[in-house]
Amino acid sequence: MSAQPAPAPLLIACALGIEQLALRAGGRGGADGPVTVLRTGMGPAAAERSVTRVLADPALCDAAVLATGFCAGLAPGMHPGDLVVAEETRDPRATTACVGTDLLVKELVRAVPGRTVHTGPLTGSDHVVRGHERSELLATGAIAVDMESAATLLSAVRAGERPVAAVRVVVDAPEHELVRIGTVRGGISAFRVLRSVLPAFFEWHRSLLLPRR
């Protein structure tokens, strides 16, 4: 009897130590296959370097990639702790389509009951966006912005065909601008939500497992 192929791994990429801490606090129960939580460092250049390096490892070369962490909401009515499921991520170089967004929305509603889940384009930036820049980005159709998701997913698909997605937790929004994460109620709320999202990520991964090459 031939051995069953090992399930493809899942790479979850975040930028900050506090994001990685929240994800680790969520545990690994329910995962199918190996899960790696990668802290890339802040900014698109750091994300690109880290993801490209990790996916060059033969053990992770066919990993599904999910970018996560905190983001700034752009649309009026968003609140800290809301979730954003990207339909696509936008980088100055390219737009990357996300896979399985409907499933992610469904599973996030189940995993984090009572939280609003928004869907739409997630745009990238190389700096923290405030004030009038939010309005300008909103006018492009984007509903949220962060510094790493677009670079993470673009690097992932350039390294090989694979399912990719991005899920972010709103930590500040037009009516709730964040001063310093961890000292503001919005930051604490976002941390608690991020700690609860892993079951949804595992269900997404389970539905989209790639066969080993």
Image (cartoon, grey):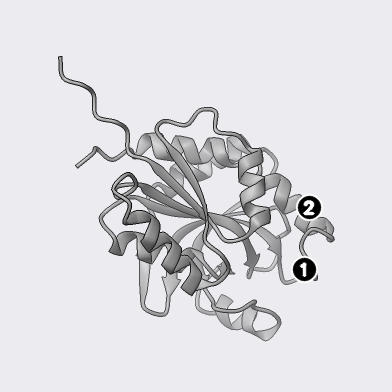
Secondary structure beneath label 1? loop
Furthest-top residue in this view: 1
Q: Residues within 10 Å of mark 1 (few under 14, many from 20)?
A: some
Q: Earlier in the sequence, mark 1 or mark 2?
A: 1
Tell me the amino acid under the disc marked 2. Answer: Ile
The quadrant of the image that shows the C terminus is top left
Q: Which residue is mark 2?
A: 188
Secondary structure beneath label 2? helix
- Res 204 quadrant in image: top left
Compared to residue 92, the image places residue 40 above or below, namely above
Q: Which mark is residue 24?
A: none
- Res 136 quadrant in image: bottom right
Which residue is nearer to you in this view: 95 or 79? Answer: 95
The quadrant of the image that shows the N terminus is top left
Tell me the amino acid under the disc marked 1. Answer: Leu
| CA–CA distance in space, label 1 to label 2 | 11 Å
Residue at 45% across, 51% down: 66
Residue at 71% across, 82% down: 131
Which residue is nearer to you in this view: 119 or 21? Answer: 21
Residue 97 appearing in the image? no
Q: Which residue is mark 1?
A: 178
- Res 145 quadrant in image: bottom right
Residue at 34% across, 50% down: 163
Q: Residues within 10 Å of mark 2 (few under 14, many from 20)?
A: some
Percent x, y of residue 121 = 48, 65
Residue 35 appearing in the image? yes
Compared to residue 135, the image places residue 175 above or below, namely above
Percent x, y of residue 114 = 70, 41
Q: In the visual, does 47 lie left or right of 135?
A: left
Percent x, y of residue 19 = 64, 53
Percent x, y of residue 209 = 32, 38
